[in-house]
Amino acid sequence: MNGADTSFILIATALVLFMTLPGLALFYGGLVRARNVLSVFMQCFSIACLMSILWLAFGYAIAFGGEGTFWGGLSKVFLRGVTADSLTGTLPEVLFFAFQMTFAIITPALIVGAYVERIGFAFVLIFSGLWMMVCYAPVAHWIWGGGFLSDGGIFGTLGVRDFAGGIVVHETAGLAALILAMILGPRRKTNIPPHNPGMVMVGAAMLWVGWFGFNGGSALAATGQAAMAITVTHLSAAAASLSWAIWERVKFGRSSLVGTVTGTIAGLATITPVSGYVTPVEALILGAIAGVLCQEAVLLIKNKLKVDDTLDVFAVHGLGGILGTLMVAVFGYGSYVAQLGSLAIVGLWTVGVTLVLIYLVKAIVPMRVTPEAEETGLDLSWHGERAYDLTS
């Protein structure tokens, strides 16, 4: 065990959990109507709790329990055989488990943004739990756990390059979000402005800080690579924030706070898969492209395709992760064949698994709330609470 590496990943683990609780919850919560903000908090919080237990039970074993071609097996269910003295590299294995657990938490939590304001809470929990184990955990094994897409797999010694989750996290969550939004259908009322842009900014700022643990911690050691990953992550976010704001000004004559911080998230998602490889100048280029491209994707999905991916999960996270994954090859840090091939394989798997799980869970519990519950708001109809007491 290396003390410096262990200390660094302890901090990184806390930062990545901070991304979901409270960062993502506040970011998404501020974007919805006031009558639904607590439902978003409840979904994010409950997903964090459920994924933690399921990661202990089966998720970690499937992803990192062994070096099988397609899954890690079940030898480490409930951390069987893992003690405080067990090591993964220079880290206590239980710390590696906890760090990877925070990734398993935030990935299904990202999907929340696609279905807010109209989905049943029971469906959210059952779908998210199954999706994490059947979709996310196997993909994590394929790329990070010694599976067939990693070094020495079907793409040779180089393998796919996904430093911190452009494919494993952002492509999977983005595609699942898009499929869910398409099947669920649009809200009864769309084009309603965010109820609290200030909350959105605070949540985005927390995500930005937490992302240092997400990308920097993925080096799994306190090294120069981790330091560079943190630096380029910050620069990409800054560039994407400004390019989004400038492009918004060019197209619509104003630069909004919500738009600018959405650009921040686009820059962070896009730099994720390549953060361990690129230079600061390359990070600026990548972020500047992401701020414009992801904004155009938002407009395309909402206005042209008429898909109510409510909080733009695919356009920001999905497309950002895919763009960053491709730029690994463009900048010369990976193989075009490996990057494109892995995107295709994981994309097909994600779409197929997501479709099967949606119809399976729909057969057990209702997917969409009643029109009356949607009109009342999920805070009151599902949770019996209101975020704001306007009578006092």
Image (spheres, rainbow, N blue to C red):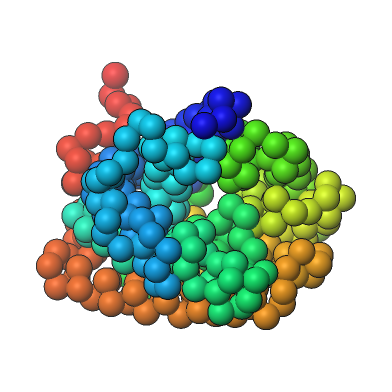
Would you place residue 37 above or below residue 243 in this image? Answer: above
Identified at 27% across, 71% down, the residue is: 358
The x, y position of residue 33, in whole percent, is 40, 45
Left-right relation of 23 to 51: right
Please determine whether, in this image, residue 119 is positioned above or below residue 94.
below
Residue 387 appears at what percent x and percent y? 32, 32
Tell whether 169 sits left or right of 341.
left
**Residue in view at x 61 percent, y 78 percent:** 155
Figure disc tally: 0
The residue at 72%/43% (across/down) is: 225
Q: Position of residue 297 (x, y in %)?
A: 63, 68
Q: Quadrant of residue 320?
A: bottom right
- Locate the C terminus and report the quarter of the image it occupies: top left
Q: Nearer the viewer, residue 328 or 199?
A: 328
Q: Between residues 215 and 80, which one lies in front from this camera angle?
A: 80
Tell which of 221 and 296 is nearer to you: 221
Instruction: Determine which quarter of the picture holds residue 41.
Output: top left
Instruction: Name the residue rendered at 83%, 55% in the picture.
Output: 282
Q: Residue furthest top?
A: 392
Residue 126: horizontal and vertical position, in percent? 22, 58
Residue 162 visible in this rendered orientation of the protein: yes
Q: Is residue 98 in view from this perspective?
A: no
Looking at this view, name the residue that lies furthest to the left: 364
